[in-house]
Image (spheres, helix red, strand yellow):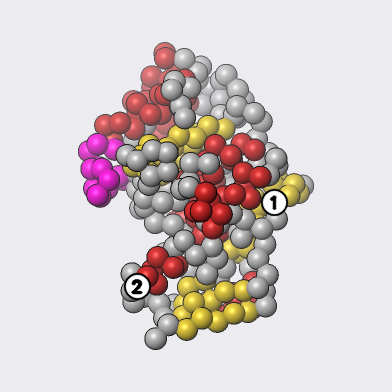
Amino acid sequence: MLTVETYANMAEAAGAVGDRARYLGGGTLVMQGVNYGDQSFDRVVRCREVDRDIRSESGGIRIGAGATMADILASHEVEFLHQVARRIGGPAIRNMATVGGNLFAQNPYGDLTTALLALDAQVLRIGSGPEPIESFLSGRSRPRGLVEAVVVPRVSSGEFRFAKVSRVKPKGASTLCLAVWLRGGGRPSDPRIAWGNMGPTPLRAKAAERALNGASLDEAGIAPVLAVATDGLDPQDDALASAWYRREVAAVHLKRLLLRQGVR
C-alpha cells in the first residue's frame, strides 16, 4: 500500500526519507514509478515549502532544487543554461521537471545533470556542506538526504556549449548528450567535457579535456581531442542505440560542438 506524507519544509522531509520512501518534487520520475507499479518504495514524501529561487551569491549562482526547467528559462542569471532547458521535454514537462529531480534521473534522461557536471557544479544537501557534482554522481545509488540546491559558476557568453542527440526531435529522450565549458576562449584553459548516456551516470571525458587544454579551436587543434573522445567512457546498449553506435558517433558530435558546426 502506498502512503503519501506531507511535511512543512525540506528539513522535516529529509528526516522522513528512507530506503522505502521517495521524495516527490516535480513528479516526473516518482509518478512514473507509481503508475508503473515500482515495488522499490511504498512511501511518497513531499513538503509544502519548495525552493525555486535562482540567485547570484559570492560563490556563483545558486539554483534551488525545486526550480523547474521553465524557471531556468525565465531566469537571466542562468541564461547559459537556456540551451539545455529548452531541449528537455515539452512545455508540460518543463513546467514540472526540477533541478533536484534531474540529478537522480536515470538514462536516457538527466540532460541538465550532464551540463552541471561540465560546469563543475556543487551540490548542497540539507544539513551538509557543498559536494562536487562528480563525487555526488559517483555515490548517487546511496541516497544520503535531500538536495536543497546546486551552485554553478558565472559563465561568460560563448564559453558553455551543449548538444543533444535524439531520435525524436525536438523533445525526445537523448541517445547521447554533450556539454563543454571552454574557459579561456579560443585556446581553452582547464576545459570541461561531459557526456550523458555514455555510462551509468553522466561522465567527464578527462583524456579529451587534457588534449583540449590550450589547443586551438580549429580542425588541426582538436584532432587529438577527437582521437580520445570516448576514452574512459562506458556506453551501454539500450532501446535507443547500441554502445557501438554511441562510440562511433561521439567524436562527430564533439567536433561539431567545438567548431559550432550545425549545433542546435
Horizontal and vertical percent position of residue 44: 49, 77
Q: Is residue 132 visible?
A: no
Residue 176, relative to residue 2: is it above or below? above
The secondary structure type at the circle numbered 1 is strand
- The three-letter amino acid code for the residue at tag 2 is Asp
237 drawn magenta? yes
Which residue does the image show at 67% across and 78% down from the upper left? Answer: 8
User: Viewer-proximal residue, 188 or 99?
Assistant: 99
Q: Is residue 223 left or right of residue 79?
A: left
Residue 207, horizontal then vertical, whole percent: 41, 34
Q: Residue at x 43, y 22 (%)?
A: 262
Amino acid type at circle 1 is: Ile
Upstream in sequence: badge 1 or badge 2: 2
* For residue 36, side relative to residue 132 (left or right): left
Q: Nearer the viewer, residue 31 or 66?
A: 31
Horizontally, residue 33 falls left or right of residue 161, namely left
Marks 1 and 2, how far apart at CA: 33 Å
Q: Which mark is residue 54?
A: 1
